[in-house]
Amino acid sequence: MAAPMIDDIELKAVQTIRQETEQDYLRQRIPGLDGTLHQHMGRRSHRVTLAGFLLADSAADDLAKLQKKAAAGDEVTFTADITTALDIQHMVIEAFAAEQTIGPAGQTAYAIVLAESPPLPPPAEVSSFGGLGDFGMGDLGFDAGALGGVLSDVASQAGAVMGAVDSAISAVEQVSALANLADLGSLGNPLKPVTDALGSVAGMAPAAAKIGDAVRKLLGG
């Protein structure tokens, strides 16, 4: 039996090693169903508990190394026969305890709790609509690719509409400015009915601008 290793520290005098695997289930009660439905949420991290002694000739150095690793909280590599069949790449030291017996033949005992630290999954696809393909839309009978194309077309059309709204608001504001000129404000001015009507429309410009800003935010613009 090979001695367990935490990074480059060889634990020669291990007395016990315990490995635990625990599944994570969400229990659901279904009306009319005898028993409880267990929805599998995935596996929890593998855990390993070790207890043993540090050999006298290297006890001080090994204790210092283990204490520094436990205090740092960084990921470590762990190898032992008991984890051979498990796909564990890195672990973290969740807990560490040391106990020293005082006396001529004093020994240093230790206990370590290690937990699996799996790598993060690949980053989710980023898109204007949150990457619908990542949410299992195919399981619901939707073609995520086709739906994404439709949503992209909707976004393009919405952008074109907002461009037209911006142009219309700009035109109204320009003509409205003419209504404020003194020579166009007289009763004899043939453009007065037009400018009066445009003045009413111009009053709607701020509200339309706010709506346009809200639509742009929804479209990620």
Image (cartoon, grey):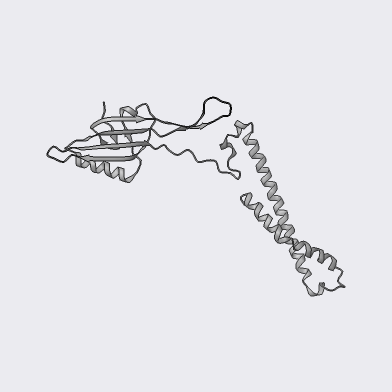
Considering every residue shown, the one lying at the far top of the view is 34
Q: Say which quarter of the image contains residue 31.
A: top right
Residue 16, position as x, y percentages in the image: 27, 30
Up-down relation of residue 194 to residue 142 (above or below) = below
Residue drawn at point x = 75 percent, y = 68 percent:
177
The foreground one among 29 and 52 is 29
Residue drawn at point x = 83 percent, y = 65 percent:
194
Up-down relation of residue 156 to residue 14 (above or below) = below
* Quadrant, the N terminus: top left
Residue 67, position as x, y percentages in the image: 27, 43
Q: Say which quarter of the image contains residue 170.
A: bottom right
Residue drawn at point x = 68 percent, y = 43 percent:
153
How many numbered marks does the figure carry? 0
Residue 152, position as x, y percentages in the image: 65, 43
Residue 17, position as x, y percentages in the image: 29, 30
The answer to whether 64 appears left or right of 27 in the picture is: left
The foreground one among 113 and 11 is 113
Up-down relation of residue 37 to residue 208 (above or below) = above
Considering every residue shown, the one lying at the far left of the view is 104
**Could one spot residue 62 in this view of the protein?**
no
Residue drawn at point x = 66 percent, y = 42 percent:
151
**Could one spot residue 114 in this view of the protein?**
yes
The foreground one among 37 and 212 is 37
The foreground one among 11 and 178 is 11
The answer to whether 102 appears left or right of 166 in the picture is: left
The answer to whether 108 appears left or right of 50 in the picture is: left
